[in-house]
Image (spheres, rainbow, N blue to C red):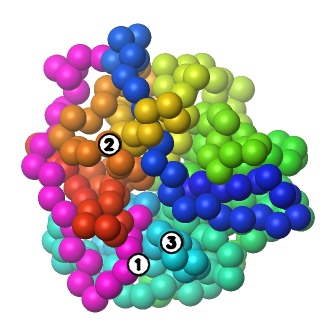
Amino acid sequence: MINFNLKKFNLFTFIILLLVGCKKGDDMIATQQEYRIFSNELQVQIMGCNGSAMEPFITRDGQYMFFNNSGENDDDMNLHFARKINDFTFEYLGELTGANSEVLEGVPNMDSAGNFYFTTTRSYTTNLQSLYGGVFTGENITNVSSIDQNLTRNEPGFLNFDSEVSKDGNTLYFATGKFSVNNFPDEADLFVANKQNGFFEVVAESDNLMKNLNSHLLEYAASISSDDLEIFFNRSNIQTFELTIWQSKRTAKNLPFETPIQIEAISGIQTEGASISDDGKNLYYHKKHNGIFGIFKVSRE
């Protein structure tokens, strides 16, 4: 999750990752036997990248990984990319020019046609919009503009973030957070939007589709499978200061996601930003290791 401080709306300040997470409750846990279970946690190597790496996204064709740096130590949070060598090794290609600015950019994602989406604070103080899109050329991002016109609540303190587009480009899964005096959301839930006449709009059945995922805790950072039937996301509880990744499934796209389970193969309690590969076999995410944020993965058959 990208965390923000909206205490002063005329000076939008990025706050680095807050270690928040989730506390399991008996009413929110399904049995492990109902799911394809992950195992074999490995750290991903990005050859040539000497900095931090967070919020990975594996492109639908499997050729690239997009990610952002952490923005710690007063560094500007920007978008980067790397070319896949194998499932756990990538070659760093540099920053994604065309998308980055002097303020925050993060949580990159893309559909199979190359339509690229990310979160940025570049215009929030003027229009309360924070989800942007463009086109990935293979080398950079072009035609960058806001996609948030029909998604923003137009109310200071509410901010859309952590979007992920479906493989076909027709559905957007994203989080909306309410910020006040804290450096983390007072509330955050997941929503579903469909593209209509070129713009994304929240569907009327969004609350029903996400009713088993959203709770009194914080939900965000969704990753959707290639068939839209399996979802991965973060759930956070500011009382426990843990970060954990969960998964859920459904049998049809018009049905709600079922009761989720926590992914037990992911070690630690400070993990975020899941991204499922197109074949559903590898799940990528970030966590802090030896003092720096890096990318890890778990796998399944």
Q: Nearer the viewer, residue 145 or 294?
A: 294
Residue 144 in magenta stretch: no
Q: Among all residues in the image, which is located at the extreme top?
A: 27
Locate residue 289 relative to residue 178 in the image: left or right.
left
Residue under the image location 32 percent in, 85 percent down = 50
Q: Quadrant of residue 262?
A: top left
Residue 236 seen anywhere in this rendered image of the structure:
yes
- Vertical relation: 184 (above or below) 53: above
Q: Quadrant of the C terminus?
A: top left
Span highlighted in magenta in the image: 30-54
Residue beneath label 3, please? 72
Left or right position of 112 against 77: left
Q: Position of residue 99 (x, y in %)?
A: 62, 79
Q: Is residue 52 above or below residue 271?
A: below
Q: CA distance from mark 3 to mark 2?
A: 20 Å
Q: Amino acid at mark 1?
A: Phe
Numbered tag placed on residue 81 in the rendering: 1
